[in-house]
Amino acid sequence: MFNHCKPYRCNILKILAAVLMILPGIIYASSNTAHSPTMLPKFALLGDSMTWIGGDSCENPTGWSHVLKNSSYVGDINVYARSGATWTNTSHTKVDTSFYSEVLHDDNVLFNQALRLIEAEGDSIRKSPDYIILFAGANDAWFADKRPGIYAKDKSHKYYSFPTDIKPNEITSLYGSVSMICDMLHHSFPDANLLVVTPLQMSKVSAEKIHVTSDIIEEAAKSKGCTVLRADKEVCILHDVESNSPTYTYDGVHTNAEGAKILGDFILRHLFLESHKID
């Protein structure tokens, strides 16, 4: 009697055993949702050609954004960077989020990139970023003569808070431009982490001039509560080396794939390995 139930009982036991074997994995996966695609932090990238070379889709391996895209710690990345961009505004800089240029121009500035990001969020085109990385300054140092007033000493903060009617052509120093943009982004994305990366050393500009430019960027960004990474001092891409025999760049200025990996790892290490103690 009931002998016909033995195979059934056997199957049930096998199923239970299988469930017990995979249960720890299920629990582990559920406890690590921060690494699931939907929970990973979202990034917005602003900057010059050193960011733009990765492409809007971050598929070009010569760009450090490619390293971020392929990291298991990073989710969506939206790129607003443009080749030729500067931090510093000029007296002719206009509010223009539709303007497109890949060379130095009065309107090719991070101010307009920041406005594009703010407008995109306001129009619900993009989701609010968890991290905003601003990586620029190479063109400010390289073409300082095209940015009159770039090294002005005025650091009065009363002009740098973010009213709705702000005029970029009234703020034409590097210090003021950095301060204003950081204010804008803090105001629009109060929960986002702002990370400012100073420019790398390169063949076209002396290391000393890059350091001076980076000192101003660091001082202004830190005055607004931003985290600053000194790529000009902490990344092993050096003016003398790239001038004599490009090693980590393909033209003395822009990173090759190896240089991009070094720079990308430097940024990731700060964001996750050091800040969050992830091995």
Image (cartoon, grey):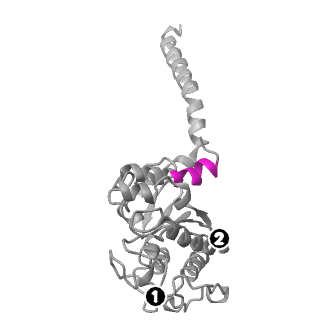
Amino acid under disc 1: Thr
Could you say whether the residue bearing mark 1 is in a helix, strand or loop?
loop
On residue 222, the disc is 2
Point out which mark residue 90 bears.
1
Q: Is residue 202 above or below residue 124?
A: above
| Whether label 2 touches label 1, CB < 8 Å | no
* Rendered view: 88 above or below 3: below
Q: Classify residue 211 by image quadrant.
A: bottom right
Q: Residues within 10 Å of mark 1 (few under 14, many from 20)?
A: many
User: Which disc is residue 74 wearing?
Assistant: none
Q: Is residue 267 magenta?
A: yes
Residue 203: % across, % down: 40, 63
Residue 12: say if magenta. Answer: no
Q: Residue at x 36, y 71 (%)?
A: 83
- Give the image location of residue 81, x and y in percent: 41, 70
Whether residue 58 is visible, yes or no, is: no
Question: Residue shown at 43%/50% (left/top)?
Answer: 261
Q: Residues within 10 Å of mark 2 (few under 14, many from 20)?
A: some
In the depicted view, which residue is nearer to us: 145 or 162? 145
Instruction: Give residue 108's position: percent from left, percent from top.
Output: 40, 80
Q: What is the CA distance from the residue labelled 2 to the residue labelled 1?
A: 23 Å
Q: Earlier in the sequence, mark 2 or mark 1?
A: 1
